[in-house]
Image (cartoon, helix red, strand yellow):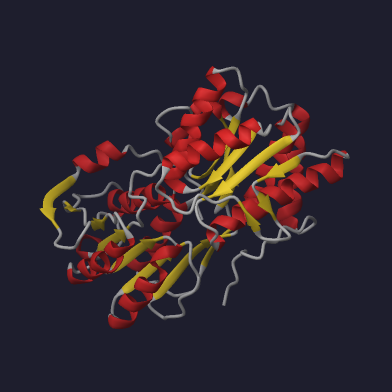
Amino acid sequence: MRNIKRKTGMAAAVLGISALVLTACGAAPEAAPSGSASGSAPAGASDFTGCIVSDSGGFDDRSFNQSSYEGLMAAKTDLGIKVKQAESKAATDFAPNLNAMVKGGCNITITVGFLLSDDTKKAAAANPDKHFAIVDDNAIDAKNVKPIIYDTAQAAFLAGYLAAGMSETGKVATYGGMNIPTVSIFMDGYADGVAYYNEKKSKDVKVLGWDVAKQSGTFTGDFDNQGKGKNTTVTFANEGADVIMPVAGPVGLGTMDAVKELNAGGKDVKVIWVDADGFESLASGNEFVLSSVVKEMGQSVEDVVTSDVEGKFDSTPYVGTLENGGVALAPFHDFDSKVSAELKSELDALKADIISGAVKVKSPSSPKTK
């Protein structure tokens, strides 16, 4: 897989969308057909329609919906395909939006997130001649559904080691939106990375918000309420945590609001973002992003669409790892000069050890391929 980073402005993308509104509840407008793409496009690409359905976080969540959306937009630009998209505002929009995509002539429909699994399975069963791919879920066993999944525990392990190494209080924290596998896998890796740091350095950095052994911790209960994210962050900071990793989609924007206020009041709290590189995707508070646990969803979505355009679709799961670049620890950006050369070297060595298998990273939620 090519490890290419893209930063697509959502405003610019919206300007390229036509005013033809889909009939489904919560559906976004249909994109205008693209013109000739630069370079050589696969034969038949101009007659191919790639589609995407978001979960309730929407396409501007600065996280996994947005990254997946940008992957489809990249396929539009690079291949010259047509695209359509349907933005869900609530779970009740999933089925109508999927039906609208199928009726709209989509060759492949990308659904974003674990929460769309049941509706994707039903749509795929009802339309065996259509192709589907689902990001962050591997529960569907069907010839016309390709799972796009990520072993994010690997990159989160690096993030936990980094957090422990950068903490000045000896306390770090994480919380989730909901206790589902695609969330807890981040929290497992993060907590295990802290534990590994403690083992190697004879330290006792504590993790607030998640207990790996009990598989329980702090959750806001949804991916929408930014106020809960802000309150949770303030609580963690008041308990002494100075590096916090929200795994909660748009709820994490509440963490950024809290950190801006906390740091203005004299605290020194850093954030580790997830899914996308928060330094690049967040509208504000970027200076407080230490790093991010990145899933290269944009590239994987584009790769899956490209394979379908070329007639190479199959249902074998795509699994993103540190080795294939599907997951990664993002650059330190404004913190680069504050992360010691020693810590950087340790992280590089740890990454190599995870890839080689010398260090085993395993979460109960790690992808299980068929």
Q: Position of residue 119 (x, y in %)?
A: 35, 72
Instruction: Name the quadrant of the C terminus.
Output: bottom right
Is residue 225 at all visible to an observer of this figure? yes
* 129, 103: nearer the viewer: 103
* 213, 136: nearer the viewer: 213
Residue at (31%, 57%) from the top-left corner?
90
- Find residue 203 and report its image quarter: top right
Q: How many marks?
A: 0
Q: Is residue 130 left or right of residue 147?
A: left
Is residue 277 at all visible to an observer of this figure? no
* 220, 182: nearer the viewer: 220
Q: Position of residue 261 (x, y in %)?
A: 50, 23
Q: Is residue 202 left or right of residue 313?
A: right
Q: Position of residue 5 (x, y in %)?
A: 46, 42
* 352, 189: nearer the viewer: 189
Q: Vertically, is 290 above or below 2?
A: above
Residue at (30%, 40%) from the top-left corner?
10
Q: Vertically, is 310 above or below 76?
A: below
Residue at (28%, 82%) from the top-left corner?
126
Residue at (35%, 54%) from the top-left corner?
56
Q: Residue furthest left?
A: 20
- Find residue 122 and report its image quarter: bottom left
Q: Position of residue 103 (x, y in %)?
A: 18, 71
Q: Residue furthest right?
A: 202
